Amino acid sequence: MNKLKNENDSTPELTSYSRDFYEPVYTIGVAASKLGVSVHTLRLYETEGLIITYKTPTGRRLYSDLELEKVKCIKKMIQEEGLNFEGIRRLLAFVPCFKLRECSSKLGTLCKAYKISTKPCWATEEKCLDPYPSCRDCPVYKKIVSCEDVEKLVYSSFCKS
Ligand code: SF4
């Protein structure tokens, strides 16, 4: 499927958050307890490419409210929609990252990371043409917060506004 077919669509309105929302402040134990999941689950979501954990210079994992909201959405997709990790990755791959990055459509056409349809660009080995030092700081990762965001963004890939 040509994901760039409707490249002139406008980007949907998404909620803005304060800087604090993106600050990695929760240890893995605190994050797991706030979410009602196990530490193992958080590590699994990370290795499956669904979240990007902040790592301190000593290798300690920290999570922000962004990751907490993302995990809530992942849980919902699994429990309510019956998706598995593969399905979630494929769904996230439809998010039009070139719109969120405001890349030119030409750049979007050339970007190998965007063309991968099996996983979101941050989880691919292919490098995007204009990468952030860490995908965790990239608008593409930061703007996908809730399941509503995923729905709006994926919808915008297919429908003209
Ligand atoms: S910097 Fe990372 S998340 Fe952002 S568009 Fe490139 S690959 Fe995707």
Image (tube, rainbow, N blue to C red):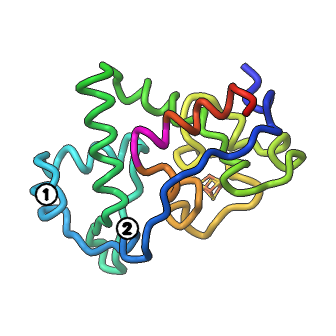
**Mark 1 neighbour class, 10 Å CA radius: few under 14, some 14 to 19, many 20 or more:** few
Q: Main secondary structure of the magenta part?
A: helix
In the rendered view, tell whether residue 27 sits above or below residue 102.
below
Q: Which residue is mark 1?
A: 34
Name which residue lies at 19% across and 62% down.
Answer: 28
Q: Secondary structure at mark 1?
A: helix
Residue 147 x %, y %: 40, 39
Q: Left or right: where does residue 54 sit relative to residue 94?
A: left
Figure quadrant of residue 52: bottom left
Q: Amino acid at mark 1?
A: Lys
**Considering only order in the chain, which callout, 2 or 1, is on the residue closer to the N terminus?**
1
What residue does disc 2 label? 54
Pick the quarter of the image with the N terminus: top right
Q: Nearer the viewer, residue 149 or 26?
A: 149
Which residues, given as a range, are shown in magenta? Answer: 146-150
**Quadrant of the image for the C terminus?**
top right
Which quarter is ligand 1 in?
Answer: bottom right
The percent coordinates of residue 56 (x first, y second) are 34, 77
Q: At 58% across and 53% down in the image, what residue appears?
A: 140
Where in the figure is residue 88, as x and y percent of width and height?
43, 30
* 37 left or right, relative to 100: left
Q: In the image, what residue occupies the spot 74% across and 61% down?
A: 130
Per the rendering, the mark at residue 9 is none
